[in-house]
Image (spheres, grey):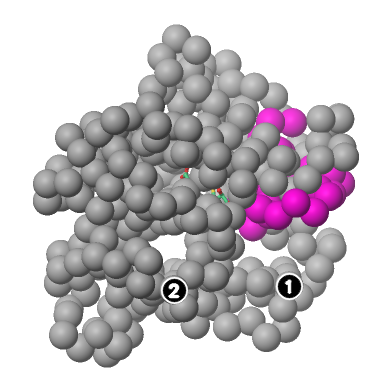
Amino acid sequence: MFEEFKNITNSEAYKKAFQDRMLLRDPSDPYKLLGNTQRDDFIPHLEKLIASLPPKPHIFDVGAGSGEIVDLVLSKLDSAEITIEEPNSILLDQYRKRLKAHSNLQLVVAIHKSIQDLYSHHDIVQSQDLVLAIHMIYYLSDFRSDKLAPNDDILNFVSFLYNLLSPNGTIFLVYAYQQMSTGGKAAKHYFLQKDKLAYKNLDAIWSARENLLHMADVKQLLDARYSQSSARIESRITHSYLYGKNLEDIAIMCIAGELGCADDEPFDATILDVCFRFVDEHADDIGLCVEERDCPQKGMYRCNQPQIICTITRG
Ligand SMILES: C[S@@+](CC[C@H](N)C(=O)[O-])C[C@H]1O[C@@H](n2cnc3c(N)ncnc32)[C@H](O)[C@@H]1O
């Protein structure tokens, strides 16, 4: 099992999990993704936001991945200026190529760095009408550290992005509800066996996300830091799914969250063995079943991957 994951880098493994499986497209409809329903669930909310943007908006996509969102949503804009930040060079190149196919979207700059590396360089991406932070929040905290400060990590991140917004600009933040998701539960299972500190830290990180973002506690902190503005925060949960052609695919997609990494170090394929055993032995806990409903994923394996959609607007 998992032969294709031997002797490759973390970035390559991540691409196989995220792009090739989670974002697997329906061969009969290239705009439909088979590998997950998270996008179908958040896109209507994003489209509503996009419809309210000023003409020729500035959009900053952080942890941008390969730019699937361009085909699915951004390409519908009459025109826009896009800045992207992404530490995985394979995915960043794909995003650049994707933008070239859309003459209405102009690339301002593609930044090959982690978001944390930009905190002291906010001058390069000022006055954004929309910041997209889609399924990338998993990489803000070093959960192997004994000096974990998850509240600060989230606050520094949100505060940095908030400071880049023009008046009425919005941060569109989406992330898997890891306490309940297959990927989150697999990560907890892995760290319980391999790294007790990381196991404990994940709880602290997820609880910080819950309080600051889902319960909107970050508002008070932003309003105190930026006294000229008043933040408006909305948060909702969607019950979304992952789909795989087999159980191996489901195990592989578990590395698209905290178990994955964007660097060029060798990938440790034993992570997948642990994830596979987890998926196989905890079917009820992750809602594992074969999809029987009449939908494009009929016959595929399905499991739970709920997500939180949080919007933070600078009022
Ligand atoms: C699940 S993917 C989401 C990609 C894209 N936002 C999307 O929704 O299609 C998470 C992305 O976060 C990137 N990432 C990892 N560590 C990061 C960091 N420290 N700062 C910014 N992005 C990071 C990964 O390389 C990956 O492309």
Q: Is residue 257 part of the magenta span, yes or no?
A: yes
The mark lying in front, picked from 1 and 2, is 2
Q: Which mark is residue 121?
A: 2
Residue plotted at (24% across, 65% down): 127
Residue 175 in sight in this render: no
Numbered-mark total: 2
Residue 112 pos. (x, y %): 55, 55
Front one among 128 and 193: 128
The image shows residue 45, relative to residue 187, as above or below, that is above
Residue plotted at (48% across, 39% down): 95
Magenta segment range?
248-275
Q: Is residue 195 rendered to the left or right of residue 296?
A: right
**Considering the image in quadrants, where does the N terminus appear?**
top right
Front one among 90 and 139: 90
**Considering the image in quadrants, where does the C terminus appear?**
bottom left
Q: Is residue 114 rendered to the left or right of residue 132?
A: right
The image shows residue 188, relative to residue 223, as above or below, that is above
Task: Indicate the quadrant where residue 91 lies.
Answer: top right
Mark 1, secondary structure of its residue: loop
Q: Is residue 65 part of the magenta span, yes or no?
A: no
Specify the amino acid type for callout 2. Answer: His
Residue 16 in sight in this render: yes
Ligand 1 under 8 Å from disc 1 Cβ: no
Q: Which residue is mark 1?
A: 144
Mark 1 crowd level (few <14, some 14–19, many ≥20, 10 Å Cα): some
Q: Which mark is residue 49?
A: none
Q: For the residues marked 1 and 2, what is the alpha-carbon distance in whole angstroms?
A: 26 Å
